[in-house]
Amino acid sequence: MKHPARIFKEAIMHLFKKPATCGYPFEKAKVMPNFRGRIDFDSSKCIGCQMCVRVCPAKAIEIKLSAEQPPAPAPVEGQPAAPVKKKFDCIMKLDRCVYCWQCAETCPKKALIMTQDFELAHVDRKELRRHYK
Amino acid sequence: MSKITIPLGPQHPALKEPENFMLVLEGEQISGATVNLGYNHRGMEKAAEERTYIQNLYLIERVCGICSHSHTTCYITNVEEIAKAETPKRALAIRALFGELERVHSHLLWLGVAAYEMGFETLFMYTWRDREQVLDCLEMLSGNRVHYSINTIGGVRRDISAEQKAEVLKRIAYLEERTKYYVKIGTEESTILARTQNVGKLPYDVAIQRGAVGPTARASGVARDVRKDEPYLIYNELDFKVITHDTCDVFGRLVVRVLELVESYKMIKQILNGLPEGPIAVKVPMRLPAGEAVNHYEAPRGEDIHYLKANGTDKPDRVKVRAPTMANLQSVAYMMEGGWLADAPLVIAAIDPCMSCTDRAAVWDPKKGKTTVYGWEELRKMGIEHYKRRGVDFSRL
Ligand code: SF4
Ligand code: SF4
């Protein structure tokens, strides 16, 4: 059965409704609690196994030895010298990352931290290459 | 009347994706149409050979933005078949749930696009607003709106909690209400009827002959649906109907898609209420034994086919993707013939084309440094010869 202007009533009703969109960027945008955002790095946990680098589909992550290494712990009398824990840096190329979180899920030491950060756009490309120390 | 040939596209002829249609016009009537592809070739299949199986998941997902879950599920079914992995039942159910949520978001998107092509922008706004509900469900369950990345080799990455289940059911209930309204609008509003009825005709036998798939075929009365014909995941346990329509025009395609939404809501509720208990993933070794697998999957746009060849390393030897739009393009050329120029965008949009899915074939000879495009006859001859060498004779077909 044909009905001209069937949608008219609905359209009029919508005039009195609140907008369905949010006023971002003037208002804070809501993201879901498990939203996959930027990956952060905790250097104290990383053991430099490179598993994250190997698994990353976008070649977005690099793990390098830090320029400054922590000093060796003072040797204790009568015990073999404790192995020094090396310190690693992480270089994260945010322009390559596809935010899949595969690296964080692969990391055996949970050194990669999953955050809900999404406001990552930048006018300077260099800023997209983050160096976490 | 003299004939002129005009190009439609490649600057978005219907959807915002590049493809080109050469239309032969007699006045305002289309008397012939050819489809030209190749503007969106991204070399994905070759790139997949350079990546490990787990990295490929994220690459294959990006074959298409709208049916990302369809492609990964099809690919991963191949991987798991070769690895002989026993995927847990709960993981299969979650995959099916995502498949249906994806169908809902894809069909609502299409409804909006079709309304837009008809010049009915009010409906476009409403459907896209309501589509946000299902996108929110997907973001909540998986962590992203479009590239859900829920699949992993051997299962899924995230489980579904009781609160999430309740939230999804709440949103689906809202969408069910809205869809009832869209069914009414779609079948009664005279603007839609005038724009879609008897436009882009594709009779039953032509749909079969040209190999149409998905809602395009079902709107021509071809009851073909991989979920019913060869159930994968847990579809054999779900109760749903294959929706067909016999008007064979754009109106039929609209009705099929809107009624499929209703079936999808039904399935989502069944899956969530009967979610089997157990683990969500099993461990699968990084290296796959040598072997081959082919699988198909009912994507929102139709049958999606993936082929995978493994050679015993952690990278595939060959990945081949046949996206549903590829199968439907032959029908588009037929649908446009005899129609009006003004209807062309709507007819193209009515198969819900996805060009980035489709563009995948170009032959480049590195020795001669030139590109060749094979015609149909040549491809057919090569195919027959290829299978003859393997002992199958297709020459009489
Ligand atoms: S989130 Fe994905 S793409 Fe980004 S660094 Fe990790 S593995 Fe690579
Ligand atoms: S971040 Fe994790 S996976 Fe990457 S090198 Fe460090 S410990 Fe290994």
Image (tube, rainbow, N blue to C red):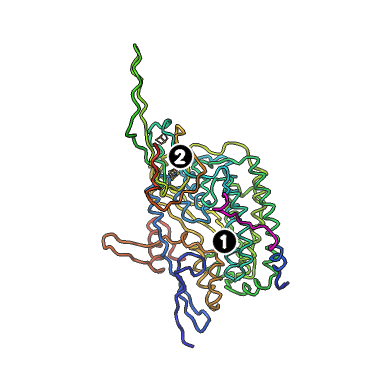
Q: Can you tell which quarter of the image residue B300 is in?
A: bottom right
Q: Chain of mark 1?
A: B
Q: Position of residue A79 (x, y in %)?
A: 35, 14
The amino acid on which the numbered mark 2 sits, given as a three-letter code, is Asp
Q: Is residue B21 left or right of residue B46?
A: right
The answer to whether dots 1 and 2 both sit on one chain is no
Residue with the mark numbered 1:
B214
Residue at 55% x, 42% y: name it. A34
Q: Does dot 1 land on a helix, a strand or a loop?
A: helix
Residue with the mark numbered 2:
A40
Q: Position of residue A54 (x, y in %)?
A: 39, 40
Residue at 43% x, 31% y: name it. A45
Instruction: Please state which of residues B70 and B304 is positioned toward the viewer in this rendering.
Output: B70
Work out whether B291 lies above or below B210: above
Range of the magenta residues? A14-28
Q: Does dot 2 land on a helix, a strand or a loop?
A: strand
Q: Position of residue A5 (x, y in %)?
A: 70, 71
Q: Is residue B234 left or right of residue A111?
A: right
Q: Position of residue B39 (x, y in %)?
A: 41, 65
Work out whether A52 lies above or below A11: above
Q: Chain of mark 2?
A: A
Work out whether B282 lies above or below B31: above
How many neighbours does mark 2 have within 10 angstroms: few (below 14), some (14-19), or many (20 or more)?
some
Residue at 54% x, 42% y: name it. B156
Instruction: Please state which of residues B275 and B291 is positioned toward the viewer in this rendering.
Output: B275
